[in-house]
Image: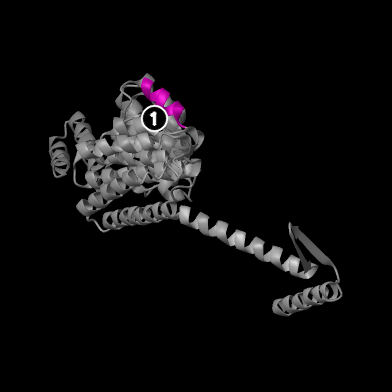
Amino acid sequence: MRAALWFLALFGVAVAIALFAGNNQAVVTVFWPPHRLDISFNLMVLLLAGLFMLLYLASRAVSAVFSLPLEARRWRAQQKERAMYGALMDALAHLMAGRYIRASKSAQNALAQEKSLGVAADPSGHASGHSASLASQLRSLAHLLVAESAQALQNRSLRDQHLEKALQSSAQRHAHEVREGVQFRAARWALEDRDASAALDWLGQLPQGAARRTLALRMKLRAARYARQTPQALETARLLAKHRAFSPDAAQSIVRGLALELLDDAHDPSQLQRAWHSLDDNERAMPELMVHAASRLMALDGDPDMARSWLLPVWENMMDSRSELGDKLRLKLIGVLEAGLGSLDAAWLASIEAAQRSRPRDANLQYLAGMACLSRQLWGKARQLLSQAAPALQDRTLHRNAWRALAELAEQREDEAAAAEAYKRAAQF
């Protein structure tokens, strides 16, 4: 269709010229004393057109001749540029293949090509913004590849040297993304060297937006855990869970583990209370954390009433027929309650007795009720409950404690044979 339109246009032009020039009787007279030259107007137009074309072609030829050196320089620069980018790609390929020495040499070759080429300057010698940006990015990436290879080869002096050069090359405003990448790599190298403080310093130099990225938060979590900065690690884990960087189960497990570490780091009841209140509502609702916090409070000679107030939701959960508490957590809960039996109030004692009566075959509850009666000097009832619970207890600690309590009760009755038998049963575990 386009060719047909061109033909129609050419025919139209030809018809217009024929109509104009066919009946044109005009004559152009050129006076060149003492001569006179008469030519037709059509021939004059053709001569002028020919002269114009001749001058145009001559000017193009002269321009082409004078631009030959510039074109030669451009061609040589293009070849060097291709060699430079080829060396950079070779360095990346060798690095991914684990050939770190070859990767370092190829990256240094790319740097040498860039230095001889002068990418940041155009042929006229003036720097352009786009070429300067490409040059700074290329230098930063090449230095980063050399530093990455040196890190793999444990050549820290070479790594630090090229890391500093990569930071200098990426210091310009239009290379901020490359600079962030260099800082991320430096933080990762510090983590590989187990230098948590250096990793946190590198991450602290990131802009506010980059510091909130999932990669930065993951690295910050690792660094904080290496540095034993549990509060900061816990806060970072919360952010990662909020950003869905982990699966829900994995996030809950990580947060729970860090919260347990935070509670373990407390060395007195006041520190433990501050650590407990620093947890959010969801974390304080975890049964593992409630039981562990109460256990730590009892171990630090804290307030038993406060410990039992933390344990109350877990106790109520355990009494529920649909409870999903594990056996290990149930045993730990009973152990914490046993540690505070001396200050047990009437409400808790009644709750324990009611739980034992509702589940008469639960040896653990029988043991707890028996020890509660023992602390209240209810010898007969304590002996009855412990005698029923001791043979069925699966936990070694509870089993041993039950037989030892029975031995003490037998000694109070001056039943030496029963006491010796109970001590023997306790010693077996």
- What secondary structure characterizes most of the magenta part? helix
The one nearer the camera, 322 or 354, is 322
The one nearer the camera, 63 or 319, is 63
The one nearer the camera, 369 or 99, is 99
Q: Residue at x 45, y 31 (%)?
A: 279
**Above-or-below relation of 410 to 323:** above
Residue 118 in the image: state x and y as whole percent: 37, 44
Q: Residue at x 28, y 46 (%)?
A: 112
Is residue 272 shown in magenta? yes
Residue position marked by numbered label 1 in the rendering: 231
Residue type at the position of mark 1: Pro
Residue 297 in the image: state x and y as whole percent: 35, 26
Q: Quadrant of residue 121 in the image?
A: top left
Quarter of the image with the C terminus in it: top left
Number of marks in picture: 1
Number of other residues with Cα within 10 Å of mark 1, as a class: few under 14, some 14 to 19, many 20 or more: some
Residue 150 in the image: state x and y as whole percent: 22, 44
Q: Quadrant of residue 159 in the image?
A: top left
Q: Secondary structure at mark 1?
A: helix
Residues rendered magenta in the picture: 271-279
